[in-house]
Amino acid sequence: MLFMPMSPVFKGTSISTNVVIKCTAAVLWGLKQPLSIEEVEVAPPKAYEVRIKILATGICRTDDHVISGAMTTKFPVIVGHEASGIVESIGEGVTTVKPGDKVIPLFLPQCGKCSSCIHPNGNLCVKADLTGKGVLSDGTTRFTCKGQPVYHFLKTSSFTEYTVVEEISVAKIDAAAPLEKVCLIGCGFSTGYGAAVKTAKVTPGSTCAVFGLGGVGLSVIMGCKSAGASRIIGIDLNKNKFDKAKSVGATECINPKDYTKPINEVLSEMTDNSVGYTFEVVGRLETMVDALASCHLSYGTSVVVGAPPSSKMLTYDPMLLFTGRTWKGCCFGGWKGRDDIPKLVSDFMAKKFDLDQLITHVLPFNKINEGFDLLRKGESIRTVLLM
């Protein structure tokens, strides 16, 4: 059921740099446990850090990977990484944002100095924490609960009323942007949309196949459509997702279980062997190989978009690449966060794409576990939690 309240009224904030804030957060105490609503203490921002009042946050599959153990982290931890909010206070040396600014925290920072940041085609900043260290750059955490330190997730931690992030992990956005919608630009939408338009660089008139029709997969479809693809095939085991996929741009949808042949052979026959681009948006090793095999053997490009499981090795036939295919990875859609996310928000404000199509549920923050249940049952695309 879609619970869609009126757009929240977001007010400016005052500087309280030296004050510890007590607030509500959803703490994950251990593996495969429900999130626990707790009172936490959020320390003031240190030098080059920003404390943000989170006002809207999306539930992403990556967050569930932490709960299930598919993604490594330390416990206890505050997960969540797709969000928007307002700067509450800033630490010494912060110059690019000020209290009251609307911002999107970035799970992929942009330090502007490392080899990835300075290269025009790179975006995987060395300051990112994709291995689950759970602390900021000084090696400590800003969260405490019941007298014990609580770890950060992706240096973001948005399942809390207040969070502290580094300045390099903050994108200042349009002051008129509706935070309950643009929070999706903090991860899901940008990841999928960018996979098509920035990483794969889908060409007009091409044929694309998208494996996985969750929120990110639908965003890939939106990107393929925006790039001018003439045929976009959605692939999922859940037929209930097909109507939504077609509404955002898929020209047809198929379920691999309806066929006895391997999915790459099915796609080849359907398209007269013309699939130029494939996207794996599930995060399963087997599906990654299927997607690679499904693009044209000579000129096809396959993009890994779904986060792979931790500590797993993938086996594939190297002939799949030898014939000419290109296999690419894609983190955060290839975007440089501080440079590109404000532009994507501006594009949204200019109605170049519609985020409403991705939001199926809006819930109050204290119903966060209900939101995860919807995700696991396949009943939601994106659930947005309002603080």
Image (cartoon, grey):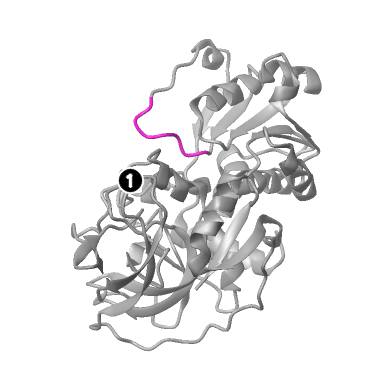
Which quadrant of the structure image shows residue 256? top right
Please name the residue shown 74% across and 19% down the image.
259
Residue 66 x %, y %:
39, 46
Left or right, 348 with respect to 169, comes to right
Span highlighted in magenta in the image: 306-312
Residue 76 x %, y %:
28, 55
Residue at the disc numbered 1: 115
Q: Secondary structure at mark 1?
A: helix
Query: Alpha-carbon neighbours of circle 1 within 10 Å: few (<14), some, or many (≥20)?
Result: some
Which quadrant of the structure image shows residue 51? bottom left
Residue 89 x %, y %:
33, 80
Please name the residue shown 59% across and 37% down the image.
200
Front residue of this view, candidates 191 and 71: 71
The dominant secondary structure in magenta is loop
Q: Quadrant of the N terminus?
A: bottom right
| Residue 328 in view (yes/no) | yes
Q: Amino acid at mark 1?
A: Ser
